[in-house]
């Protein structure tokens, strides 16, 4: 499932990276464009004319990023579902690697993988250097997801379609809600391979344009899962405190939402455990990028230590 809006500079590279996957199975690509006003729909139509497994959904009226996201995933019919934002990239062996793990591991409802972080100016932070040491052997529990919130990019997920739709809230939902939903029903895995690339600070990215609205929803989700899983109040409290401190530091008006959630979920917790959690949460921030020239590529001596076979395409800069 690909969602996009006014991403004419990015969508071609995104779709090329998906349609160039090396797989032993067929897959469908659902591309939902939210009534873009630039050339994004034309680019999607061109791809659809050349690739029969690409199904375009070109909206005439803008429904908003969250509704477009939900409606895109509602269209998925496969056993396993992946997501990719229209400004991100997948590396050639992403689907095969992730599918192989999920197919042989029925107890897992979702998996993620490492990604390279890059921007429009040629800067990059290699995903193999990102610190995921707080997840032993890549195991991600429901409790981990509750306390950290988004710990991996949504463009790296593969989940079982049967795990989605257990809850039907009255409010808009996005990736963090689904992540909690999936892991409330099974195990999660962080695959220790770099299988994609996440574009930082992309033009028209939802997190860039609707930051406060999304953060307010985080607190709504925290309250919702607190009602459903009161025995996990400690982890929701840690999530609330982390976001309260981050919003307070950055002068976001959503800090009050998380203060209320923290007060509502407060458990008995030692200062040492709280301090340790805050250190881990700080580690999971989007890393600071550095000039791409210093990063080894698969074509250079030594290659990329965490990349599976198939290598990585050159990361494009936007027009």
Image: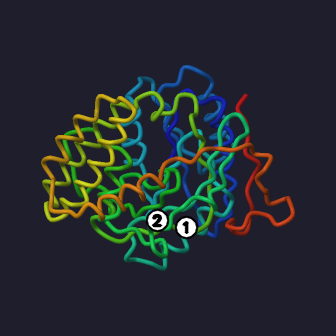
Q: Is residue 134 left or right of residue 122?
A: left
Q: Position of residue 18 (x, y in %)?
A: 63, 51
Which of these two is toward me, 136 or 317?
Answer: 136
Which quadrant of the figure contains the C terminus? top right
Residue shown at 69%/68% (left/top)?
308
Q: Position of residue 316 (x, y in %)?
A: 73, 40
Residue at the limit of the structure toward the bottom, as seen here: 104
- Toward which corner of the image does residue 121 lie, by quadrant? top right
- Specify the label residue 111 is tagged with: 2
Residue shown at 79%/57% (left/top)?
296
- Specify the label residue 98 is tagged with: 1
Residue 37 higher or lower than 264, as above or below: above
Q: Would residue 67 be visible to someone looking at this image?
A: no
Residue shown at 52%/35% (left/top)?
4
Which of these two is toward me, 219 or 78?
Answer: 219
Q: Is residue 292 left or right of residue 91?
A: right
Residue 181 higher or lower than 86, as above or below: below
Q: Is residue 288 left or right of residue 190?
A: right
Q: Secondary structure at mark 1?
A: helix
Marks 2 and 1 in Cβ contact (< 8 Å): yes
Residue shown at 20%/45% (left/top)?
169
């Amino acid at each position: 499932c690909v969602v996009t809006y006014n991403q004419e500079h990015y969508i071609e590279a995104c779709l090329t990276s998906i349609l160039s996957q090396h797989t032993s199975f067929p897959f469908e690509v659902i591309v939902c464009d939210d009534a873009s006003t630039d050339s994004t729909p034309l680019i999607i139509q061109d791809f659809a004319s050349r690739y029969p497994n690409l199904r375009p959904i070109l909206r005439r009226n803008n429904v908003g990023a969250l509704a477009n996201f939900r409606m895109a995933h509602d269209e998925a019919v496969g056993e396993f579902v992946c997501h990719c934002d229209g400004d991100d990239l997948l590396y050639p062996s992403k689907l095969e690697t992730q599918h192989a793990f999920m197919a042989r591991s029925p107890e897992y409802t979702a998996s993620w993988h490492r990604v390279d972080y890059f921007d429009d100016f040629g800067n990059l932070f290699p995903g193999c250097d990102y610190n995921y040491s707080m997840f032993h052997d890549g195991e991600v529990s429901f409790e981990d997801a509750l306390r950290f919130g988004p710990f991996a990019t949504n463009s790296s997920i593969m989940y079982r379609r049967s795990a989605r739709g257990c809850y039907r809230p009255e409010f808009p939902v996005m990736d963090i809600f689904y992540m909690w939903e999936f892991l409330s029903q099974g195990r999660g895995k962080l695959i220790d391979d770099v299988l994609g690339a996440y574009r930082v600070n992309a033009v028209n990215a939802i997190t860039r344009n609707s930051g406060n609205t999304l953060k307010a929803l985080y607190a709504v989700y925290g309250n919702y899962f607190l009602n459903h899983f009161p025995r996990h109040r400690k982890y929701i409290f840690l999530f609330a405190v982390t976001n309260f401190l981050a919003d307070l530091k950055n002068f976001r008006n959503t800090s009050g939402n998380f203060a209320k959630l923290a007060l509502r979920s407060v458990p008995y917790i030692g200062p040492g455990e709280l301090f340790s959690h805050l250190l881990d949460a700080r580690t999971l921030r989007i890393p600071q990028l550095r000039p791409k020239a210093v990063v080894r590529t698969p074509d250079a001596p030594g290659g990329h230590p965490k990349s599976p076979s198939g290598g990585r395409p050159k990361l494009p800069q936007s027009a």
